[in-house]
Amino acid sequence: MPQTTWPIFVISLARDNDRRSQIARQLTDAGLDFRFIDAVDGRGGLAPEWESQIDRPGTLAKYGYGMSDGEYGCSLSHIIVYRKILAEGLPGAVVLEDDALLTPHFAEFYRKAAYLGCDLTQLFAYSVRIWRWPGRKVGVGDARSFRLAENPFSAVAYCLSHKAADYLLSSSLPVRSRADWPADLTLIGSRVTIPSLVRHPPPTASQSHIAEGRKDPRAAGVDFTAGYAKGWRRLITLSSWRRFFLKRFSRMAHLGY
C-alpha cells in the first residue's frame, strides 16, 4: 500500500448486522475497500479489561455528570483505531462510524487522497466554529476545508494522520471524556470540510446506542460556572481574552444533518 493511501476503518458493533450491511453497501457501491473495527459494546456493562482503562471520577470532575457505559465504549472504540494506526505503522486512516451516510463526493475525496496535508480533517459535524479566513479547495465539487477554531461535536467521519493518532492516544487514557474529543484539535491545525462529505441521521434515542444505560446525568450541587471568572476579573483572565478574540475572528457554521 503506497504511503499516500490511508485505509478506511469502520467502527461497528460485531453483532449489529443491519448497520454493518448498510455501511458496507455504501462503500462497496462506491468501489472502496474498508475494514471493520469491532467496537467495544458497553450496553451490558464493560468487561474488566475495559473498566480498567476508564476514570469515572475524572469524568464527573470534567463534565459534572457521568457517562453511560455505551459512551465509554464509543471512546474506547476510537482508541482501538488510534492504537492500530500506531501499531501497524500506518501513515493515517479514514475513520467512519457505522451509521455514516456517504455523499457522492466522499469517494472522490478519498481517491484523490485529499486528506493529505492535514493531520486531522473532519468530514462531518453538526455545527462547528471555524476561523473567518478563506478555506482551502479540496478538489471535490465546491467543498473547502476550514481550520477549526474550537472542537466540534461528532466523530462520525474523520481522517487522521499517524501524528494525530499519537496525539489523541496520549490524551485519551484513562478515558474521562467522550470520543469527540479527548484533546484540543486546534493545536494540531485540524480542519473541517464544508459542505460535509459525510452525513448522519438525526441523533434520536432510537438511532444512538451510546446513551443506553445512562444514569445520574447531572450530579446534584455541581457549580458549572466554577471555572469561569466573575465580575471585573473577566477582563484580566487569559481565557476571557481568548474568547473575545475567538468571537471576533471566527464564525459558526451550521451544517445540519
Image: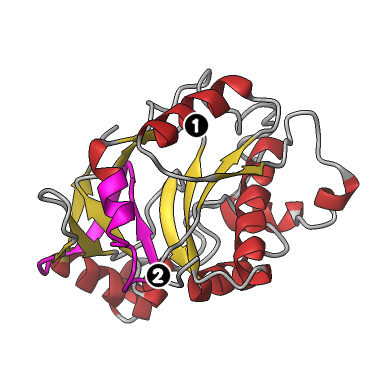
Task: Give the mark nearer the N terminus: 1 vs 2.
Answer: 2
Secondary structure under tag 2 reads loop
Amino acid type at mark 2: Thr
Residue 90: horizontal and vertical position, in percent?
Answer: 56, 69
Q: Position of 63 compared to 135: left or right? A: right
Question: 129 above or below 221?
Answer: below
Q: Position of 230 compared to 51: left or right? A: left
Residue 97: horizontal and vertical position, in percent?
Answer: 51, 40
Question: 2 above or below 30?
Answer: below
Amino acid type at mark 1: Ala
User: Which region shows up in magenta?
Assistant: 107-135
Residue 149: horizontal and vertical position, in percent?
Answer: 28, 66
Q: Does residue 235 appear in this view? A: yes
**Residue at 68% over, 51% down:** 76
**Residue with the mark numbered 1:** 24
Is residue 62 magenta-colored?
no
Residue 113: name its quadrant.
bottom left
CA neighbours of label 2 inside 10 A, class few (<14), some (14 to 19), many (20+): some
Residue 63: horizontal and vertical position, in percent?
Answer: 57, 52
